[in-house]
Amino acid sequence: MEQDLRAGRLATFAYFSLNGFLMGMWVVHIPGIEHRVGISHAVLGWLLLLLGAGAFAGMQAVGPLTDRFGARTVVPLSAALCSAAVVLPGVATNVWTLGAALLALGVGNGCLDVSMNAHAVQVERGYRRPVMSAFHAAFSIGGVLAALTGSRTLSLDWSPAVTLGAVALGGLAVAALAAPALLRHDAIRPLDDATPATKTRRRTPRHIWMLAALALMIMLCEGVANDWSTLHLRQVLDATAATAALAYGAFATAMTVGRLLADRATARLGPVAVLRYGASVAALGLTAAALSPWIPLALAGWAVFGAGLSGCVPQLLSAAGHSDQDAAGVNVSRVAGLGYLGMLAGPAVIGPLTHVLPLNLTFLLPVACCVIAACVAGILRPPHPAPARLEAEAV
């Protein structure tokens, strides 16, 4: 059993890394695809909404399927769908085919996102200690590998179609090879679950929707960092383009390192403390970045912001998945879905605010989201305490 659990954990790492790599390869090739199709930045912005819509739809659809058929079945199929879809933008020839391609890629990404997180919850249940954050770090590492790979293939003048086609084949291979190591749906049961649960259709509990609302706020903060950190240094502090790019680099690096360390912090302090103190640290970091007149302090602020946020979303997804094993897929889909909407909404909300406030002062909105998350972190405590706890007692 221990060997199967270890193999399942490695397979989960593979799927998280694959997801990060696939989406990273799409991002790297956005400029080339935009030029090939012959569309403006504005049209591309509208088309990216289809990517988000497809992801949200995929998340909500795959949750019940994961609960019914098990992550062992759904994760490889979702990974295969996402891998096959990544080549479609590379062969798109006009705005209509690109829109359809992005919709399909979004669906594949959403399906893989929820199903692999549901399996991660199952692995965490087997280990009986926090392991979720490390999986999310693997996703980030996959994105870094995509940036390095894409830079190399672009330097060799490979077309997006050729590169993404090769990536699709590699992704299909990973999806197939890692599948046998995934855990069966009933492989891990809670200690207090003596008899199989009767599966009945039920409404999503209010507790899950509260976790989803927190995920929306936290991932809104991540979206702000992704799209506005570089512009902040460039426009507000008049940094050079090369220096401004370090803002997002500092944020992303700190978030990746933080996720690699967050599981140990969760095991020692508990998920409530990780969310409460992490969100508090993130609020302080972004406040320092927003109000700093000096570039080095602003860069440090963005790094602290990333470090603080790093362990927050994994705690929310873990809590959603553990709240009810038989509805783990649906519950994770609710939290991940609203979180994804927050990721999309962050950049969109900041833009209009810049018409009435300086860019750096608009960051007070994500600061407020972090403060709220810190204040209500107690929501991570399970509504009905169980004899066997996966995490340490929260402080």
Image (cartoon, rainbow, N blue to C red):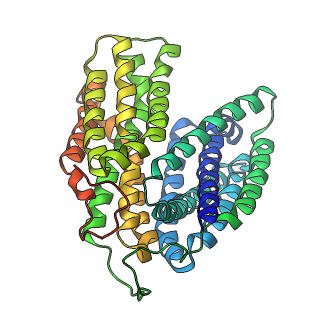
The residue closer to the viewer here, 88 or 259, is 259
The residue closer to the viewer here, 369 or 381, is 381
Judge left or right: residue 283 versus residue 199.
left
Q: Position of residue 225 (x, y in %)?
A: 40, 33
Q: Quadrant of the N terminus?
A: bottom right
* Residue at horizontal 79 percent and vertical 38 percent from the top: 159
Where 66 sits versus 46, above or below? below
Give the quadrant of residue 393: bottom left
* Residue at horizontal 71 percent and vertical 39 percent from the top: 36
Judge left or right: residue 179 versus residue 272.
right
Please identify the residue farthest to the front as the structure is shown: 2
Q: Position of residue 64 (x, y in %)?
A: 48, 75
Where 35 sits versus 242, above or below? below
Q: Position of residue 97 (x, y in %)?
A: 67, 55
Give the quadrant of residue 37: top right
Q: Report if residue 237 is visible in the image.
A: no
Q: Report if residue 110 is visible in the image.
A: yes
* Residue at horizontal 25 percent and vertical 44 percent from the top: 276
